[in-house]
């Protein structure tokens, strides 16, 4: 999952570009041919990110493990360079150095280019054009029709670039060929790190992941990663999520996380994954839409993250991970859910609590808690394992059928089914003395936080749909005198069930037109909400986190 916010919100949330592309009305991948006029540029606003030092207690690690961390971070730095190439272009260091204004340079580095990721990819620097929906995965002048008509091996591949040959025709170039030099260096670092791993399973994973970087065959390393659950150090690395491809949602972007396991919190979470098959059977949808059985080898663990790179570090910062994305691995072994506790705590204290003080009714503010925020986020990730991965009518996988709206539908499903899981487990007596009102009100506050992600984010679209759906079903009411929101707990449950059924059915049917209609009809910011969000800007509440991180910050040399 990916996320974020901002302090200037006028016009942020319209789904113009993404909506046109989704409806098939945007004929070209290319941006406008002329640079945007200076008066139409978005503002440079690095202040929308709250600085946070990414650190963790490493005192329990051996000298070999600490050396291994250095190697893993160096490999991650290469993923950062590769993401720059995918999102913006080559030689980003020279480009950044050429920006004279310190604030502009810093903001460009945060956004991996001259487009504001927390403001619908709006251009904020002169002499550039709008960002292509396909980023650098496709030729900028390629039309959707040209792509759809082309007969190419690896045309919809997760790990291929679309380029033009000398005659101007479309060809595919595998990632491992396009980025061969950088990937060779990263693979060598992972193999060297494996020599310092004290856990044989983790060493095997690092070796297989090194092989995957050089072949684009990630399934063996994904399977090995699913079996590697006891190591105190964790690494997630490679081309993983497809959010950066806003044209089709096919191409994955390079990223990396280096993490330290929190043993105490992990023990609290370990038992919940076993409930997935039971929860799948209880989904509020027809039997055909829950016929798949989620893998039972899933696990839940808490980590302190010590390094983000590439896509995971661009704009909004992930606070929980649910991987692998490979549907075959998910069906055979489930997924692993990694809760990034220190990053989550930073967002709760610096963003969620201040938002609650402005927009949540005073009588319910006591229900906004970190434990509820942690649980909501955790079960969001677990809920990715529910529903179906393949359409029920032979239209392929859900991801293939829903194209560019697949990610937002999946994030919306996970949001709503995460709450369904909490309610179900509470009714079964598995959550102890939890007050469900905490989860509902914290979710409401979290909606305001997540809506600020903007229209270009899958999470942002999902949360806008959820907010408007809940409003239509009376799940909350707004006090016009105080400008605060109050949850109606009974109607919230009813709205949850209705939206769960809608999203699961759209996914199971592979109903692209229906998913686009839901996104376009409910995926907008209405006037009253936008005015309330501007109040968060006026209160100078940050949108997301910017990390001070690296080998020196950690004291590793």
Image (spheres, grey):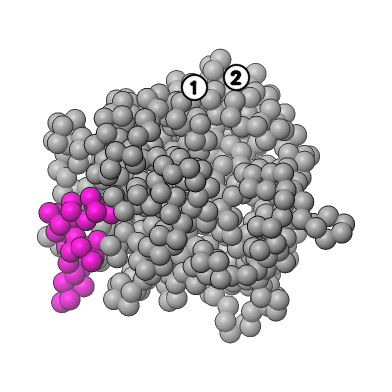
Counting from the top left corner in percent of width and height, residue 361 is at 17, 64
Q: Residue at x 72, y 33 (%)?
A: 214
Residue 1 image label: none
Q: Residue at x 72, y 48 (%)?
A: 152
Q: Residue at x 40, y 24 (%)?
A: 297
How many residues crowd around disc 1 within 10 Å: few (fewer than 14), some, or many (20 or more)? some
Q: Are marks 2 and 1 in contact (CB under 8 Å)?
A: yes
Q: Residue at x 14, y 43 (%)?
A: 435
Spatial separation of the CA atoms under disc 2 and disc 1: 9 Å
Report whether residue 192 is seen. yes
Quadrant of the rendered structure where residue 292 is? top left
Q: Is 132 on the left or on the right of 509, as rendered? A: right
Q: Is 99 on the left or on the right of 446, as rendered? A: right
State which region is magenta: 470-499
As rendered, which of 537 and 41 lies closer to the eye?
41
| Mark 2, secondary structure of its residue | helix
As rendered, which of 171 and 437 lies closer to the eye?
171
Residue 237's place in the image compared with 104, above or below, is above
Q: Is 438 on the left or on the right of 377, as rendered? A: left
As rendered, which of 120 and 32 lies closer to the eye?
32
Quarter of the picture holding the C terminus = top right
Report whether residue 110 is seen. no
Please check the rendered image and state whether residue 276 is part of the magenta-colored stretch, yes or no: no
Quadrant of the rendered structure where residue 239 is? top right
Dot 2 or dot 1: first in sequence order is 2
As rendered, which of 442 and 476 lies closer to the eye?
476
* Residue at the extreme right of the image, as rendered: 166
Residue 204 image label: 2
Q: Is 520 on the left or on the right of 124, as rendered? A: left
What residue does disc 1 label? Answer: 228
| Mark 1, secondary structure of its residue | loop
Please check the rendered image and state whether residue 487 is part of the magenta-colored stretch, yes or no: yes
């Amino acid at each position: 999952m990916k996320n974020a916010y901002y302090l200037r919100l006028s016009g942020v949330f319209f789904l113009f570009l993404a909506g046109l592309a989704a409806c098939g009305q945007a004929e070209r991948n290319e941006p406008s041919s002329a640079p945007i006029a200076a008066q139409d540029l978005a503002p440079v606003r690095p202040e929308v990110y709250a600085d946070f030092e990414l650190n963790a207690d490493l005192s329990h690690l051996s000298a070999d493990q600490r050396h291994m961390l250095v190697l893993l971070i160096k490999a991650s730095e290469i993923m950062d360079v590769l993401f720059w190439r995918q999102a913006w272009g080559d030689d980003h260091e020279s480009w950044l150095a050429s920006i004279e204004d310190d604030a502009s340079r810093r903001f460009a580095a945060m956004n991996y280019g001259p487009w504001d990721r927390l403001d619908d990819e709006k251009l904020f620097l002169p002499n550039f054009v709008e960002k292509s929906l396909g980023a650098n995965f496709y030729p900028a002048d390629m039309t959707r029709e040209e792509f759809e008509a082309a007969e190419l091996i690896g045309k919809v591949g997760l790990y291929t670039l679309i380029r033009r040959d000398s005659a101007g025709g479309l060809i595919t170039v595998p990632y491992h060929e396009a980025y061969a030099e950088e990937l060779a260096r990263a693979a060598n670092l992972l193999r060297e790190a494996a020599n310092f791993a004290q856990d044989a399973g983790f060493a095997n994973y690092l070796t297989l992941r090194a092989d995957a970087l050089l072949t684009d065959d990630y399934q063996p390393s994904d399977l090995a990663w699913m079996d590697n659950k006891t190591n105190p150090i964790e690494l997630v690395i490679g081309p993983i999520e497809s959010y950066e491809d806003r044209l089709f949602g096919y191409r994955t972007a390079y990223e990396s996380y280096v993490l330290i396991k929190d043993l105490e919190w992990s023990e609290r979470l370990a038992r919940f994954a076993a409930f997935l098959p039971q929860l799948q059977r209880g989904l509020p949808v027809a039997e055909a839409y829950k016929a798949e059985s989620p893998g039972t080898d899933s696990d839940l663990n808490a980590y302190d993250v010590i390094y983000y790179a590439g896509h995971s570090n661009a704009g909004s910062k992930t606070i929980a991970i649910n991987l692998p994305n490979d549907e075959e691995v998910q069906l055979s072994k489930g997924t692993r859910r990694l809760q990034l506790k220190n990053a989550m705590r930073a967002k709760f204290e610096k963003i969620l609590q201040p938002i609650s003080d402005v927009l949540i009714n005073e009588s319910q503010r006591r229900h906004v808690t970190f434990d509820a925020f942690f649980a909501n986020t955790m079960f969001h990730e677990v809920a990715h394992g529910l529903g179906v991965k393949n359409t029920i009518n032979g239209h392929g996988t859900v991801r293939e059928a829903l194209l560019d709206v697949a990610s937002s539908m999946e994030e919306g499903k996970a949001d709503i089914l995460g709450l369904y899981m909490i309610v179900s487990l509470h009714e079964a007596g598995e959550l102890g003395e939890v007050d469900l009102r905490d989860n509902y009100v914290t979710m409401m506050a979290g909606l305001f936080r997540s809506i600020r992600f903007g229209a270009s984010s899958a999470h942002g679209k999902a949360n806008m749909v959820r907010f408007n759906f809940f409003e239509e079903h009376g799940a909350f009411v707004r006090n016009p005198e105080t400008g605060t929101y109050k949850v109606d707990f009974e109607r919230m449950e009813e709205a949850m069930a209705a939206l769960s059924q809608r999203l699961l059915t759209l996914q199971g049917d592979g109903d692209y037109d229906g998913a686009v209609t839901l996104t376009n009809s409910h995926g907008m910011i209405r006037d009253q909400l936008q005015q309330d969000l501007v109040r968060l800007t006026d209160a100078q509440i940050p949108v997301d986190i910017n990390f001070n991180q690296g080998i020196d910050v950690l004291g590793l040399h």
